[in-house]
Image: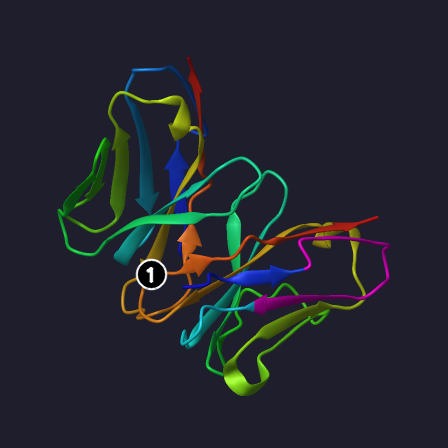
């Protein structure tokens, strides 16, 4: 079945440093979604990427979807303590309309002030 | 607009007991999903409803789990009898299109 691998598992940064997490799917995706989960919270939707090679920005966050629609990345510029949490990518399989999400393992980000 | 709600927020039960989790999706969302996160592992899909019909239940671990969505509104997930390995956080999500919105989850602990 479809698998989504996400690295790194943990990332510790000093406030102001950049952060990147990467996802790679075993199969071509219809789209990929990114979520953020604060400690003790639930996944909160950040963004969805649909097109091959798509790049989207949200303030300090930059999301990319690979040309082959099998990989994606999230880059945060100049991290802040409010960025702390677990970042998940989640893919929907090619040909799937509104079906299940296959999640990566998540990257736990800690930011030291 | 109210988000996805789940009840209870926490449940502690003994092995062999029954637990029923409830999810109320965002109003108007036809798609409802159940996911589970076992400690230290990734969030895994359990099943997907479109209105009251089960579209995909490929992630249901075994026949101790029963999900229903009568009337196509709220959904329940019953675990009977519960086993130790059922412990984890059960998330519900809903969508009208591709973007899924998650509820706060039910933290289940089976002792």
Mark 1 secondary-structure assignment: loop
Q: How many labels were placed on the picture?
A: 1
Applied colour scheme: rainbow
Q: Nearer the viewer, residue B48 or A57?
A: A57
Q: Residue at x 59, y 74 (%)?
A: B75
In the image, taking residue B31 as reference, residue B46 lies left or right, namely: right
Q: Residue at x 27, y 63 (%)?
A: A94
Q: Residue at x 40, y 22 (%)?
A: A81
In the figure, B78 relative to A79: above or below? below
Q: Name the residue furthest front.
A: B1
| Rendered location of residue A95, percent (x, y) | 27, 69
Q: Residue at x 28, y 36 (%)?
A: A74
Magenta-span inclusion, residue B93: no
Magenta-span inclusion, residue B17: yes
Mark 1 crowd level (few <14, some 14–19, many ≥20, 10 Å Cα): some
Q: Which residues are magenta?
A: B8-23
| Rendered location of residue B100, percent (x, y) | 39, 60
**Parent chain of label 1:** B
In the image, taking residue A13 as reference, residue B84 lies left or right, namely: right
| Rendered location of residue B56, percent (x, y) | 48, 74
In the image, taking residue B38 as reference, residue A26 lies left or right, namely: left
Say which quadrant the N terminus of chain B sits in: bottom left
Snapshot quadrant of residue A88? top left
- Disc 1: which residue: B99
In the figure, A85 relative to A13: above or below? below
| Rendered location of residue A106, percent (x, y) | 44, 38
């Amino acid at each position: 079945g479809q698998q989504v691998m996400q690295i790194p598992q943990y990332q510790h940064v000093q406030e102001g440093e950049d952060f990147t997490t990467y996802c790679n799917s075993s199969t071509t995706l219809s789209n990929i979604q990114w979520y953020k989960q604060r400690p003790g919270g639930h996944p909160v939707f950040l963004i969805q990427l649909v097109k091959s090679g798509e790049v989207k920005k949200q303030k300090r966050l930059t999301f990319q979807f690979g040309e082959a629609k099998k990989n994606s990345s999230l880059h945060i510029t100049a991290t802040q303590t409010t960025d702390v949490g677990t970042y998940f990518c989640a893919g929907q399989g090619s040909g799937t309309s509104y079906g299940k999400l296959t999640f990566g393992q998540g990257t736990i980000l800690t930011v030291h002030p | 607009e109210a988000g996805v709600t789940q009840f209870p927020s926490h449940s502690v039960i003994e092995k062999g007991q029954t637990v029923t989790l409830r999810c109320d999706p965002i109003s108007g969302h036809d798609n409802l999903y159940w996911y589970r996160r076992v400690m230290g592992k990734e969030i895994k899909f359990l099943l997907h409803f479109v209105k009251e019909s089960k579209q995909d239940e490929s992630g249901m671990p075994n026949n101790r789990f029963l999900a229903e969505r009568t009337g196509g509104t709220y959904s329940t997930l019953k675990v009977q009898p519960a086993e130790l390995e059922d412990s984890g956080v059960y998330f519900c999500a809903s969508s009208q299109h591709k973007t899924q919105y998650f509820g706060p989850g039910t933290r289940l602990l089976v002792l």
